[in-house]
Structure formats: structure tokens, C-alpha cells
Amino acid sequence: MSTLLDIQDLAINFKTRSGDVHAVDGVSFQLEAGKVLGIAGESGCGKTTTALSIPRLLPSNARLVRGHILFDGVDLMQFSEGEIEKIRWKQISMVFQGAMNALNPVKTIGAQIIEPIVWHEPAIARGDANQRVLELLERVGIPAARARSYPHEFSGGMRQRVMIAMALACRPKLIISDEPVTALDVMIQAQILNLLKDLQKQMNLAMIFISHDLSVIAESCDEIAIMYAGKLVERGSIRKVFSQPAHPYTQALIRSFPNIYGKQELIHGIPGYPPNLIHPPTGCRFHERCDRCIDICAQSEPVLREVGEGQIAACHRIGETLP
Amino acid sequence: MLRFGLVLKKAVQVIITLFAVITFNFLLFRVLPGDPIRLIARAGNLSPEAISRLRDLFGLDKPLVTQYFYYLRNLFTGEFGMSYTYRRPVIDILQERIANTVILLAAATVIVVLIGVAAGVIAAARRGSKTDQSLVVTSLVFWSLPTFWTGLILVILLGVYVKAFPVSGITTPGASFDSSFARLLDLGKHLVLPTITLAIVDMGQFMLITRSTLVDVLTEDYILTGKAKGLPFRRVLWGHAVPNALLPIITTTALYVSLVIGGAIQVETVFSWPGMGRLMYDAVLRRDYPILEASFLFLAATVILANFLSDIMYMVIDPRVKEA
Ligand SMILES: Nc1ncnc2c1ncn2[C@@H]1O[C@H](COP(=O)(O)OP(=O)(O)OP(=O)(O)O)[C@@H](O)[C@H]1O
Ligand SMILES: [Mg+2]
């Protein structure tokens, strides 16, 4: 297996009136072709920022402070605007949140799916492009006849299928899904997840799957990265991280999810709020909310350490927790 | 998209509205002060016989309802009565004047909408830049200029000092033209100043409305989708953002067509342009009721028609517009 995406020490700030928001600070991970990486963490921890930075789609007030994003071995950050436009969708496409207004309300879905095809493959015959649109629609379970419908004529779940068909249009190598099933009802969530999983397997796609719902990630990913306040706190295979979470934040996150098989109990929320990212706390960013905080946690920042095979975490107390 | 049933429904609404306006217009001019007989005669001492003959002639002795039906019949046969001041059929005068106003407004409206919208798109695309700031300030300044004042300043600058363009009328008085081209050229020269006046004063609102709508649209999620697809900003702008910003622009255009007549009154007065605006201005001064009555009707019909057209455009552009 070859490494498709290699993110090294990514740090991104947003310039705002009240100061620089350190939205992502030192995030690294690799993704192999055909694999699925889940990114989890509370709202505001920098998941979307990380995702959008890959095809360089961050808003204009974002600054790349440090880091490299290697895709197929080349650094996307060095590309000119024209070069990155050729990578977008052709190589890296996106699926946005289901409830979002990600489809243009005044264009038919067929027109929106065909748009990137004819843009990235100008030589393609119109008939072939149309044919591909129809195939894509059938593939995601939408009758081909609906290509002439407008987004408002579909339900939320159907719109998300359209979005997925669109993401596949140019046969990309990587799909970034940012909360693809959030805001859909549970039945539809399951359908869309299965569809994504099937397509990912069939087409051997690499995928980044962002969700704040751990159960969704557990079901659909090979690896998981847990983010907290712009930092990567733990990363590893799904099996390892869920069975032996090393970081107190990961542990709290897993505990805070209701287990549908277990006994009914009150969800353990994590007390407190994520820190202000304009003036992030010193030391470990989680220390103010951590039930295992000791003096050093407030003073020095923990580095990511190997805690098991292919599992890393950043916590001063890891040595003690491991058997 | 454009469904026949819906258009028909709109058309029926238009006809009903027109009828309401016609009826209102009829009643309005019956309750206005001034005895019509006196206004027609313009003479102090008519004999009672003469008065009753005139009443009989104009049907003024009939009940109001009967008069209303006469009125409707006359409208449908293009019979708007005689002007008190010009002593000619109103319909003839109106036809001439409407043509002149349309010449003036058509040119101005096209310029105003095209340049205003283009400037708005440019400003929104470079939001926050120096270009954007100067366009916004210029638009606000222009928008707040009074029409008649702008017209007078242009007359002084380009008409009196520079003598570049004629400052009044629609043709050079007493001139004879060898060709129709020369005649057109003369008309064109006379059009320049009034058109520029209208354009300067009215462009600002189109620029500002286009800009603010587009700035909103550009924050929508589907704009990010467009960029994510690898489309260059130019294509996202014109292909995704502008079509979604068109609706408010169409509404503004429809309103503009209705309101521009007001601006036309001022411009036509300043530049002695023999159009509808001048006609109405003079008719008010001289209490020429038949002219006013017909003009009101014409204006109301224009407004209704402009709105009807904008409704139709809505249906064409936005698939979500089903009922309204
Ligand atoms: N355009 C922006 N300008 C300023 N700050 C921003 C901007 N976009 C995001 N942020 C800030 O950056 C941080 C990370 O935001 P991001 O959207 O990446 O979080 P997220 O993990 O995707 O959250 P969610 O689960 O709510 O989607 C947040 O604190 C957010 O307030
Ligand atoms: Mg997000």
C-alpha cells in the first residue's frame, strides 16, 4: 500500500478582529490509498479546517502557519491556484453536510453533476458525459429520470445521495466527507453510511470521514484521529483506539457515547467547555477539563508518543496508564 | 419551469388589477374638484341651456353606473376624450409622447441596469478592496444626487461651457435633414444629456443591490461546492452566484421601470423633452383632466405589466417559485 495523503505538522490560524484563532496546531497523519480515516472531536476542534485545507479551500482569513500536505508525493501548498484547481474534484472531491445548502438551488442536479466532468475532461463527448451522470445516479440509488429535477424536489437523504454521486463524478482518489450524515434521521444515516462504505470498497477510494459521532466512525473507518482544540491527541486503528483508548479525552469521549447494547444510563458528558483558541491554555490543552491532570500538564505540552502498535497519543500520564 | 397554467393565473390577476385601477381612476376623476362643464367651456357665463346641452352631450346627466359603462366602452375603442389645452384627441397626443419617453427611458434603463449590475458584480467579487470601496462610495453619492440638479449641472458643464451637446428638445428646431441617418444623429445628440442624467442618478441603486445580494450569495455553501469542483472563481461567480442573485435584481428592475417615470418628469422638464413626464407636468399646471386621466391609466398599466413580467422571469429563473 502506498501513502496517498501525508499531512505533516499542519498549523492554521484564522485572522479575526479579536486576534488569531489557532484553529489547527501541529496535526499530522497519513492516509493510504483505499483506506478510510475518521476524524472525531467536539465542535470547534478544527475538523473542518483540517479537511478544507487539503484542497486549499479555506476562507481568505485563514493562514497556513506551518506544515506540508503531500498528496501523491507532491506538496499541495506549493501549487499555484491554477494547479490546485486541476487537483480539486478530479483527485480530491468532497461531500458536505447533508443539511447544508451544498447544491445550487437554481440548477438541475444533472447539470451540477455534469459540470465537473466537462470541466476537468474537456475532451469528453457530451453523450458520454450524460451517460456517466445517469450511471452515477443509478449507482447512488436515484432513478436516472430525476437528473432534471432541482435540489428542492429531493429529501435530505436523496440530496446527500446526489452529493455523493457528484463527488464520484471525476473518479477521484480521495473523498473528504465532512459530517456527511449529520442532520439526517437515523434510518437515512444508516442508508447513506452503507452507500458510502460500499462505494468506497468497490472503487477502492481513500476517504477522510469527519464526524463528531464516534459510533458512525467506528462503523465506517479503518483508522481514527481524535482532535481536541486544534491538536491531534490520539490516532490509531479503530480496534485499538476503541478497545484501549490512551488519552483521557478519548476515554471521556467514548464514555460520553450511549451504548445501545448496554444498560440505559445517563450520558457522561465531559464537564467544562473547549478552550478559547485565540489564547489556548499552556501545557496540555485539555488539562483544565482532565480528571487526571497533574502539575506538569499545565506547564509543558505533551508530545505524541507511541502507545501501542500503530497507536499514538499525547498525554503526560500515558506511561502510568499502560500496563 | 414555465408552466402555462401558472402564467394564465398571473394573467388573470393582471386583468383583475387593471380593472380595479380603471375603476379607481374613473371614480377619482369624478370626485376631483371642478365642474367638468366649466373646465371644458373655460368661459364664465354660459347660459343654462348651453350647460344642459353640454351635460347631455357628455352624458353627465346619466347615473354614475351608466357613465362608468360608457367610460369602459370608450377605453376599449381608444377613445380618451379631447385635451382641454391642446384641443386634440388625447390618444393622439399620448401616442406621440409615449414614443418620446420610451426612446429616452429605454436607453437609460439599459445603461442603468447593465452598468449598475456589472459594477455590483465587480464590487462583490472584490469585496473590501479599494475598487469595492470606491464603487460603493460613488454609488451612494450618485444615488443621493437630486435628478433635476444633476441635469442642470450637466447642462451647465457639457451644454453651456463645453457646448458638446444640445441642452433642450428632441430635435434641433428648424433644422432640415438630408438623410434619415442625419435625423437619427441629431436625435442621438439630444438624447445624451438626459440619458446621462438618468444613468448617473439611478445606477447607484442597481450597483448597491447587486453587490449586497451577491455578497450574501457568495457565502452560501454551494459556492464552496463550486470552488471545490475546481472551477475558477470567475466561473463560480457567473455560473453559480450571479444566477442566484438575479431575483432581487429583477424586482429592482420592475420597480425601477415604474419609478423611473417619476425621474423622467424631472429630466424631461429640465431638458424640455416632449415626453410623458412633460405632458403630465403641464397637464397638472393647466388642469387638463383628460390628459391626466389617460396618463394615470397608462402609468398604472406600465407598473402592472412590469410586475407581471418580473413574476414570469422569476418562474423562469427560480424553480422554487411555484405559487406566489
Ligand atoms: N472563517 C473563520 N474565521 C475565524 N475563525 C474560524 C473560521 N472558521 C473556523 N473558525 C474557528 O476555528 C475553529 C475550528 O473550526 P472548525 O470549523 O474547523 O471546527 P469543527 O471541528 O469542524 O467544528 P464542527 O464540529 O462544529 O463543525 C473554531 O474555533 C472556529 O470558531
Ligand atoms: Mg465542521
Image (tube, coloured by chain):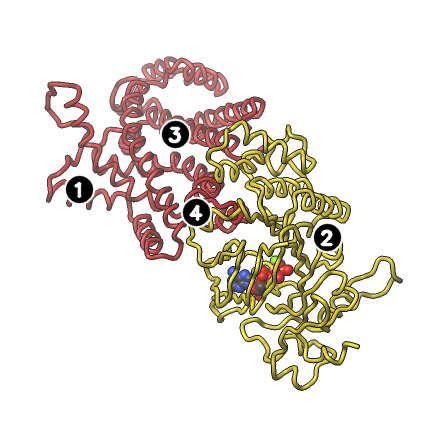
Label 1 CB less than 8 angstroms from ligand 1: no
Left or right: residue B65 versus residue B323 is left
Q: Do callouts 3 and 1 mark residues in contact (Cβ within 8 Å)?
A: no
Q: Residue A207: where, in percent of width, then height?
A: 64, 52
Q: Amino acid at mark 2?
A: Ser
Instruction: Indicate which label's residue lies in the foreground, 3 or 4.
Output: 4
What residue is disc 2 on? A220
Q: Amino acid at mark 4?
A: Phe
The verdict on a common chain for dots 3 and 1 is yes
Labelled disc at residue B155:
1
Q: Which one of the lettered chains is coloured yellow?
A: A
Say which colour chain B has: red
Q: Provide the chain ID for the residue under circle 4.
A: B
Q: Do callouts 3 and 4 mark residues in contact (Cβ within 8 Å)?
A: no
Q: CA distance from mark 3 to mark 4?
A: 42 Å
Which of the marked residues, 3 or 1, is nearer the chain's N terminus?
1
Q: CA distance from mark 1 to mark 2?
A: 74 Å
What residue is disc 4 on? B233
User: Quadrant where the N terminus of chain A lies?
Assistant: bottom right
For the residue labelled by badge 3, is the local secondary structure a helix, a strand or a loop?
Answer: helix
What residue is disc 3 on? B299
Residue shown at 68% from the left, 68% from the top: A234
For the residue labelled by badge 1, is the local secondary structure a helix, a strand or a loop?
Answer: helix
- Specify the quadrant of the image occupied by residue A188: top right
